Image (spheres, rainbow, N blue to C red):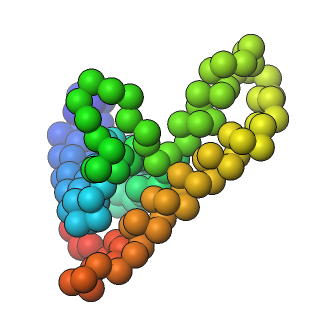
Amino acid sequence: MERRIGSELAAGLRKRSLLLYDYALAVCEHKSIILADCKFEFGLLGDEIILIDELFTPDSSRFWAEEKYELDIEIDSMDKEPVRTYLLSTDWDRDSTPPRLPDDVVDATTARYQEIYRRLTEPTSYGFTAFQPIKY
C-alpha cells in the first residue's frame, strides 16, 4: 500500500487505525467483550485524512462475548452473522436483489445488535459508559 499512496499517507493511516483500534479494544475489554475484528474506511478531504463510514458497529466489526469464547469452536458473535448465514444457505446469486429475510433471521440479528448496544453503553461501576472522543 505504501508504494501506491506514499509513505507519509500510509504512516498517517496506520497511526489512526492503531489509535482507533486500541481505543475500542480498551472499551471492549472493560465491557467483557472481545473485539475480534473491525474495518475502517478512510478518505481524503484535501490533504486531511477523514473517516468515511461507520466504525465499531455490528456491520463493521465482529464482537464476541468473553464468557462465550472458547478455542476451536464457532463463536456466537454479536453482529450480522444470522443474515450472512441465511443468505449463504439460499441460491441467491449475489448480483440480483437478495431474497426477503425471514422473521426469525431479522429477530436474531436484532437481538444481537441490541445486546452489543446494551453491553457497550451500559454504565459500569467505575462510570465508564461508551466511547469518548479521542484526539490524535
Question: Which residue occupies 81% across, 35% down?
Answer: 100
Residues 62 and 43: in front is 62
**Left or right for 79, reference 42:** right
In this rendering, would 85 be left or right of 133? right
Residue found at x 35% / y 80%: 123
Q: Quadrant of the N terminus?
A: top left
- Residue 63: x percent and y percent? 38, 48
Mark count = 0
| x and y, in percent, of residue 59 in the image | 52, 47
Residue at image position (74%, 14%) is 91
Nearest the eye: 62 or 45: 62
Quadrant of the rendered structure where residue 68 is? top left
Asked whether residue 61 appears in the rendered view, the answer is yes
Residue pictured at 67% horizontal, 26% vertical: 87
Q: Is residue 46 visible?
A: no
| Position of residue 135 measured from the top left corner of the image (x, y, whole percent) | 24, 73
Q: Nearer the viewer, residue 118 or 87?
A: 118
Quadrant for the C terminus, please.
Answer: bottom left
Estimate the x, y position of residue 54 in percent, counting from the top left: 49, 56
Left or right of 120? Residue 112 is right
The one nearer the camera, 51 or 94, is: 94
